[in-house]
Amino acid sequence: MAASETKERIAEALASLLNHNTFDKITVREIADEAEVHRKTFYYYFADKYELLAFVYAVSYTHLRAHE
């Protein structure tokens, strides 16, 4: 799996979990489990869940700007 696919999978896992819980209640372990990656893999790409959230916002913003 390519790095971009892995990062996207992790980001999608966070989005899925946010449908059922608030960000502060979601753990890195839950995100990794939902993405079906090891926690080490999560930490290879993101320092913490806040960095992941920033990544999700940046990707979303870029996507929205491209469709204006």
Image (cartoon, rainbow, N blue to C red):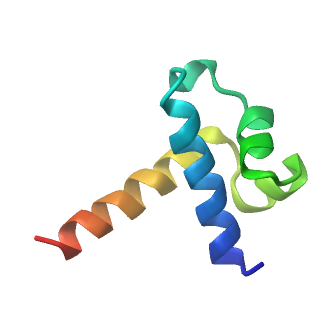
Left/right of residue 10 with respect to residue 37 in the rendered view:
left
Q: Residue at x 83, y 54 (%)?
A: 37
Spot occupied by residue 68 in the image (x, y as percentages of width and height): 10, 70
Left/right of residue 1 with respect to residue 8 in the rendered view:
right
Q: Nearer the viewer, residue 15 or 41?
A: 15
Spot occupied by residue 21 in the image (x, y as percentages of width and height): 54, 21
Left/right of residue 23 with respect to residue 29 in the rendered view:
left
Q: Is residue 21 above or below residue 40?
A: above
Left/right of residue 20 with respect to residue 39 in the rendered view:
left
In the image as oriented, which residue stretches furthest toward the bottom? 2
Tell me which corner region of the image, top left, top right, bottom left or bottom right, holds residue 5: bottom right
Q: Residue at x 21, y 75 (%)?
A: 66
Spot occupied by residue 55 in the image (x, y as percentages of width and height): 50, 56
Tell me which corner region of the image, top left, top right, bottom left or bottom right, holds residue 17: top right
Q: Nearer the viewer, residue 20 or 27?
A: 20
Q: Residue at x 53, y 26 (%)?
A: 23
Q: Which quarter shows the N terminus?
A: bottom right
Q: Nearer the viewer, residue 3 or 13?
A: 13
Q: Residue at x 84, y 58 (%)?
A: 41
Tell me which corner region of the image, top left, top right, bottom left or bottom right, holds residue 6: bottom right
Q: Is residue 39 above or below residue 59?
A: above
Q: Exactly how many numbered labels are in the figure?
A: 0
